[in-house]
Image (cartoon, rainbow, N blue to C red):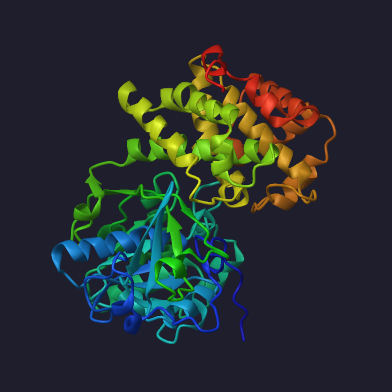
């Protein structure tokens, strides 16, 4: 029997980390428990189980359940159209699937803000599926004529892209496995191609495939990977996909946190036990490139359809995601285990504000009033004490995130003669964490697909030489000029000999130093 290789990306967001231990005598969330829930708990406005399955989602993690599934429930609530139930597929780990199946695919979303928690039971899932053990098979689910939409949250690694070329990594073991075992693929790309091939064979209309992952031009990258894989099987299939399948780009935004060990769901549900709750901030957006074909009325539930998501994507990647990395790497060096604690630190808060206004912001097309409003909103979101967003989770796979979130803007600033102290400190702090990996009591663990090879560079004793060795990795950073190498080396040397808050404060402009309480 062939062994299925481990697939990068997996669930997109860790599902097992969203479990809540049940008490021995607590009733379990399910259809029969809905009527007895407290009156302030929002329930599905339809009977769970009557929905048609119009969407397949790859990646049954916390983010999907707190974002796309919730928006889809709100869209069905607004229109009464019950065709858009979701079959949510866990790509590797089975824990969340077992929890959802035991409670009729219901779960609770807890919206947390300072001093307030609102609970909504979500019933938009028609099935929770563990891909490796699914008896129907993900390929058959994708090919179902009723399925009009496929969405994905499988993380960057789940796209099986080569860092060097940006194309499908045809030599990776998961891709080779899927070429050998077309009936039982283990990657999202293999599953999509298998499902689309089945649609082509029966002469059907293919579903629209929407990436919801934080990749630059995510729809175009997904399309390229799918076409590359299809061409390795059948050129005619690849040509058909290129002509007939739509891959709109999309931008998602919501901070979702772990609820491990959290009994808030049981408290809000009046003692009813939910083993698959998710916690999120109230803020939520979804910007989608317009496409042809039927879809839920997501626009009635807070989503926006636009001609081009590029400007939205850059603003989100650089302002939110880039600044989140700054708070994670520097804040963890200061001993903060979660981003809300770093966001509340007076120095780090002003460093984040300066970074957004004077480094990331000038590379965007946002008008100044909108930029300042967005920065103010983000600073409030970052320090929301009701959400626990661990530094390890925020900062994982930093090598995949540096170029789109940090160094692309850094290079643009350098070309225009604008200083980049925040970006240099961010990179230096990330490099420093490879040196501190495994230190007892560390506020962050290094989780990175390139960790083993980068750990060798972290052993270089001289901080400037170490920084140069890291920055020479053009697959991670792109090509950076000599002044940036020196600046990152200087920041790394300071982080080695001094505390992170002092190093951060030395990089503040005078007007921001004056704001530090």
Front-most of residues 47 and 273: 273
Give the quarter of the figure containing the C terminus: top right
Q: Residue furthest right?
A: 461
Indicate whether 510 appears above or below 157.
above
Give the quarter of the figure containing the N terminus: bottom right
> In the drawing, does residue 285 fall left or right of residue 277?
left
Residue 294 % position (x, y): 18, 63
Indicate whether 174 appears above or below 320.
below
Image point 64% across, 47% down: which residue?
337
- Please tell me in which quadrant of the rendered image residue 242 appears: bottom left
> In the drawing, does residue 465 fall left or right of residue 172?
right
Whether residue 285 is visible to the viewer of this picture, yes or no, is yes
Image point 61% across, 82% down: which residue?
2
Front-most of residues 439 and 42: 42
Residue 101 % position (x, y): 43, 81
Indicate whether 444 appears above or below 8.
above
- Please tell me in which quadrant of the rendered image residue 212 appears: bottom left
Residue 80 % position (x, y): 15, 68
Image point 30% across, 52% down: which residue?
248
Whether residue 234 is visible to the viewer of this picture, yes or no, is no
Residue 395 % position (x, y): 59, 46
Front-most of residues 476 and 9: 9
> In the drawing, does residue 49 fall left or right of residue 505?
left
Image point 28% across, 69% down: which residue?
43
Front-most of residues 317 and 140: 317
Q: How many labels does the image show?
A: 0
């Amino acid at each position: 029997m062939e062994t299925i290789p481990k697939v990068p990306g997996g669930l997109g967001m860790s599902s097992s980390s969203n479990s809540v231990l049940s008490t021995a005598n607590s009733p379990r969330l399910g259809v029969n428990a809905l009527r007895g829930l407290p009156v302030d708990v929002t329930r599905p406005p339809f009977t769970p189980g009557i929905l048609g399955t119009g969407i397949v989602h790859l990646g049954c993690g916390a983010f999907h359940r707190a974002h796309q599934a919730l928006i889809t429930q709100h869209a069905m609530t607004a229109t009464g159209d019950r065709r858009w139930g979701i079959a949510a597929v866990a790509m590797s780990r089975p824990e969340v699937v077992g929890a959802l199946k035991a409670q009729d695919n219901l779960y609770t979303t807890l919206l947390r803000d300072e001093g307030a928690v609102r609970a909504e039971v979500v019933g938009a899932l028609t099935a929770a599926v563990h891909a490796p053990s699914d008896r129907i098979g993900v390929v058959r689910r994708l090919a179902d004529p009723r399925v009009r939409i496929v969405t994905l949250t499988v993380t960057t690694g789940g796209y099986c892209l080569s860092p060097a070329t940006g194309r499908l990594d045809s030599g990776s073991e998961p891709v080779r496995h899927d070429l050998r075992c077309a009936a039982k693929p283990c990657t999202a790309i293999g599953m999509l191609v298998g499902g689309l091939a089945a649609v082509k064979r029966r002469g059907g209309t293919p579903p629209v495939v929407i990436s919801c992952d934080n990749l630059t031009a995510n729809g175009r990258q997904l399309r390229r990977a799918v076409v590359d894989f299809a061409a390795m099987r059948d050129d005619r299939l690849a040509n058909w996909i290129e002509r007939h399948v739509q891959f709109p780009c999309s931008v998602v935004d919501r901070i979702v946190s772990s609820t491990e060990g959290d009994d808030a769901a049981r408290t809000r549900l009046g003692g009813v036990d939910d083993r698959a709750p998710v916690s999120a901030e109230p803020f939520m957006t979804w910007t989608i490139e317009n496409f042809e074909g039927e879809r839920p009325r997501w626009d009635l539930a807070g989503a926006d359809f636009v001609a081009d998501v590029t400007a939205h994507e850059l603003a989100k990647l650089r302002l939110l995601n880039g600044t989140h990395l700054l708070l994670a790497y520097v804040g963890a060096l200061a001993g903060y285990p979660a981003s809300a604690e770093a966001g509340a630190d007076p120095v780090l808060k002003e460093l984040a504000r300066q970074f957004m206004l004077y480094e990331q912001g000038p590379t965007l097309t946002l008008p100044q009033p909108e930029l300042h409003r967005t920065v103010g909103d983000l600073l409030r979101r970052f320090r929301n004490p009701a959400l626990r967003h661990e530094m390890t989770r925020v900062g994982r796979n930093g090598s995949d995130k540096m170029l789109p979130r940090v160094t692309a803007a850094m290079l643009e600033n350098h070309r225009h003669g604008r200083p980049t102290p925040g970006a240099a400190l961010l990179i230096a702090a990330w490099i420093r964490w490879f040196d501190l990996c495994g230190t007892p009591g560390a506020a962050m663990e290094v989780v990175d697909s390139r960790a083993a090879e980068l750990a060798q560079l972290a052993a270089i004793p001289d901080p400037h030489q170490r920084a140069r060795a890291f920055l020479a990795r053009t697959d991670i950073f792109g090509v950076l000029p000599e002044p940036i190498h020196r600046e990152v080396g200087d920041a790394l040397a300071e982080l080695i000999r001094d505390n992170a808050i002092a190093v951060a404060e030395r990089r503040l402009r005078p007007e921001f130093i004056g704001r530090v309480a």
